[in-house]
Image (spheres, helix red, strand yellow):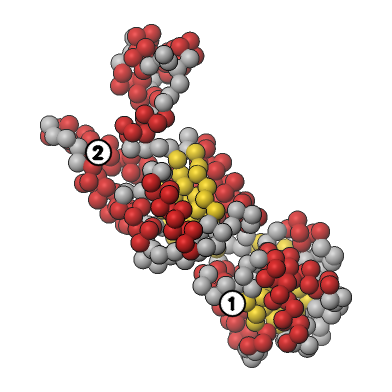
Amino acid sequence: MGATIKDIAKRTGLGLATISSYLNGGNVREKNRIKIEEAIEELHFEVNEVARGLKTNRTKTIGILIPELNNIFFAEIITAAEDILRSHGYATMICDCRSDVKREEEAAEFLLHRRVDGMILMPTGAEKKVFKKFARAGKPVVVIDRKMEGIQCDSVLVDNEGAAEDAVNRLIASGHRKIGMISGPEQVYTSFERQKGYEKALKQAKISLEESLVVRGDYTIAGGARAMRKLLEQNLDMTAVFISNYEMMVGAVMEINDSGIKVPEQLSVIGYDNEDFARASVPKLSIVTQPTREIGETAAELMLEKLEAGERIGTDAGQKATEDGERADNMAAKKQYVKEAEDSMKTIWLKTGFVEGKSVLFRP
């Protein structure tokens, strides 16, 4: 039978409350910390996370729900978020919904039933009621890269509209007027914002919007290739193209190469994300870059803030119950958490960057 917290108390001569505080990340005196750690080493004590979770209603696990696990953009964000969460003692449970609304709803329910302490997600369009359950349960939700109206949660967003507007302005400044765009799925927030930036840049330059110059892809390599093929077939006089997503950029470049079109002599190109691919392309591509690591780190930090707030509220409720000689009211603590979460809800905007390549030709 393994050592227990009582064995540590007996070995150190310290009270159970002091040892419990140490094991749960609380502050203890330095001399007591040394005693506890020596006892843990000698007794080969291991924390029973399952038992602690049942007692504290905390599992030290965060659910991460993403559209596509094989997407480099999402993978880099997850890595950055995991690094922060792990350094604070949290594990992650990652669900890939494969950009399917039904899968997304099922994954959210799965994470809720697994009693994760909170969820970081990039929504694809599932019913909001499944995410509202997290808020009602006093579990924080942080949304990345997309907006989700009607849900009380923190958000980490990138200035997609500004990024697209800047990219198209660069093409306009280089003398291009027939500028195509490979846009994303109509229902996706980032796609809508990037197309809005494209249209804004053209409008400000008094260049008429042409329906044939915008083709929707589906944020996949195959979708980018199809969209590029359609643009080339419909617009023989197109001199430049803005591709608004990394996967679609890969597919579009493949189609351009297969068509024998020379970049930038015959077609100027500005893509999105992934400096490695941009550098490997011939010529080197000009691309919009997103702060992927910063996105993941910011999301994790927001999550930790909310978790700490929830723990504080639970502690306050417990102390009040002790003072009043009554049992702690968990529902009251949850309601207080939800109210404070709504009052302190944050939306953090991050800036994109731009890496200049050799894929844009000046046309006097």
Give left or right: position of 6 versus 269: left
The C terminus, quarter of image:
bottom right
- Which badge, 1 or 2, comes first in the chain's sequence? 1
Q: Are marks 1 and 2 in contact (CB under 8 Å)?
A: no
- Nearer the observer, 140 or 286: 140
Circle 1 crowding by C-alpha within 10 Å: few under 14, some 14–19, many from 20: many
- Nearer the observer, 151 or 102: 102
The N terminus, quarter of image:
top left
Looking at the image, which residue is at 40% across and 52% down?
A: 109
Quadrant assignment, res 52: top left
Circle 1 or circle 2, nearest the eye: 1
**Residue 193, position in %: x, y?**
54, 73
Q: Say above or below: 193 vs 5.
A: below
Quadrant assignment, res 363: bottom right
Quadrant assignment, res 154: bottom left
Question: What is the C-alpha distance between the residues marked 1 and 2?
Answer: 48 Å
**Residue 138, position in %: x, y?**
32, 49
**Residue 48, position in %: x, y?**
41, 26
Could you tell me if residue 168 is visible in this image? no
The secondary structure type at the circle numbered 1 is helix
Q: Amino acid at mark 2?
A: Asp
Q: Which residue is mark 2?
A: 316
The secondary structure type at the circle numbered 2 is helix
Q: Say above or below: 89 vs 64.
A: above
Looking at the image, which residue is at 74% across and 65% down?
A: 250
Q: Amino acid at mark 1?
A: Gln
Q: Which residue is mark 1?
A: 195
**Residue 28, position in %: x, y?**
38, 23
Looking at the image, which residue is at 66% across and 75% down?
A: 182
Q: Say above or below: 302 vs 187.
A: above
